[in-house]
Image: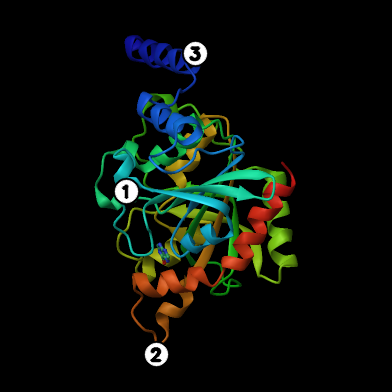
Amino acid sequence: MAGIFDRMRDGEQQIVAQPPAPSPAATEIARMVLRDGFEDRVPLAPKPCLGIVLGTGMGSLVRHLEDKRTVDFSEMGWLPSVTAVGHAGRLVWGNVGDHSVVMLQGRVHAYEGLPVEMLYRGVELFAALGIDRVLLTNASGGLATDLLVGEIVVLNDHIDLVRNALAAEYRTTNGGYVYDELSSSEAVRAAQVAGHRCRRGVYAYCLGPNYETRAEYRMLKTLGADVVGMSTVPEVIVARSFGMRVVAASVVTNLANSIDREDRQPLDGEDVCQTAASAGNGMWAIVQQILRKI
Ligand code: HPA
C-alpha cells in the first residue's frame, strides 16, 4: 500500500517540477504566425496580447479586427477540423487599435470522440505565441431562474462533470481560484454599460451532445450551477496550467425552465447559434474592456 502512495507522491513532485511547454507542432505554427507567415499572409506584429476562442455564434466577432489574416485549421493540419454548427474552424489574427489579437473561430467538443489533446490545442497554440491572457466564449443553457435568453454569464467557477483525462502536465492546476477575478468583474460591468444583461455564475460542464433532460437540468441547478454547456473547461484547465489569466463568458441560449412549457419548440444547433450571435455586442464590449487593461 505504501508503494502506491509513494508513487503518487513522487509522480506529483515530478509534475510540479516540470511546468508545461507547448508541443513542437504548436511552436512551429506559432513561428509561422509570428515570423514566416502562411504563404501570402503576412505575419503578426506586434506580439499578440490576447487569445480568444470564439464559441457557438461568436465567430462574427472577427469582423472587428483590422488588418485581418485568416488561416483555416485544415491548412495548418494540426488544429482539429471543426464540425459543430456555427464553428468555422479558422485561426484569425489582426489588430484592435494598438493591440494584436489572435482568435480561434470554433472549437471541437469532447462528445466528438477525438483524442483529448484536440480539446485544448488552441490554447497550446496561444501559449506558443506567448499569449498570457485568454477569453473563452461559449453558449449555454440557463439554469438560474433569473436568467434571460441572450444574457451573458461571466464564469466565476465551474463544475467539471466530464473530467477529461488531460495529459499529466495539465493536472497540477490549483482548482481553488481559476477565473481572473478582477478582469471578470470588469467584464460584467463593461457588458452592462454596453446595454447588455450580464452577471457572474457557475458553469456545469457536461459531455453532451444531447441537451439535458428536465431531471438533469433540475439536478444541475441543485448542484449549484447557473448555466450548463459542453465545452471550455478543458481549455480553462490547460490555460491555467500555462499560467494564463482566464476570463470565460457564456451566452445563455435557452432556459431550463422553458422546457416544461407546452408551446416549447425542440432546441437545435441553429437556434442556439443565432441566439448566441445576438450577444455579439455585449461580448465585444468585454473584449474591449480586457484590452483597455493591457
Ligand atoms: N445544455 C448544454 N449545452 C448547451 C445548452 C444546454 O441547454 N444550450 C447551449 N449549449
- Report the side of 280 relative to 275 (left or right): right
Q: Position of residue 179 (x, y in %)?
A: 61, 43
Q: Position of residue 182 (x, y in %)?
A: 72, 45
Q: Residue at x 39, y 89 (%)?
A: 262
- Report the side of 40 relative to 190 (left or right): left
In the image, farthest residue toward the bottom: 263
Q: Of callouts 3 and 1, which one flags the residue occurring earlier in the amino acid sequence? A: 3
Q: Quadrant of residue 170?
A: top left
Q: Is residue 163 above or below residue 18?
A: below
Instruction: Kindly tell me whether mark 3's CB lies below 8 Å from ligand 1.
Output: no
The label shown at residue 263 is 2
Decide which of 256, 125 is in the foreground and name it: 125
Label 3 vs label 1: CA separation?
29 Å
Label 1 vs label 2: CA separation?
32 Å
Q: Quadrant of the C terminus?
A: top right
Q: Residues within 10 Å of mark 2 (few under 14, many from 20)?
A: few
Judge whether residue 182 can be spotted in this image. Answer: yes
In the image, farthest residue toward the left: 113
- Residue at mark 3: 17
Q: Quadrant of the N terminus?
A: top left
Q: Position of residue 106 (x, y in %)?
A: 40, 54
Q: Residue at x 33, y 14 (%)?
A: 4
Q: Residue at x 36, y 75 (%)?
A: 267
Q: Position of residue 293 (x, y in %)?
A: 74, 44
Q: Of callouts 1 and 2, which one flags the residue occurring earlier in the amino acid sequence? A: 1
Decide which of 80, 200 is in the foreground and name it: 80
What's the amino acid at mark 3? Ala
Q: Residue at x 43, y 58 (%)?
A: 229
Look at the numbered discs 1 and 2 and tell me whether their residues touch, using CB distance below 8 Å.
no
- Report the side of 222 relative to 183 (left or right): left
Q: Residues within 10 Å of mark 1 (few under 14, many from 20)?
A: many
Quadrant of ligand 1: it is: bottom left
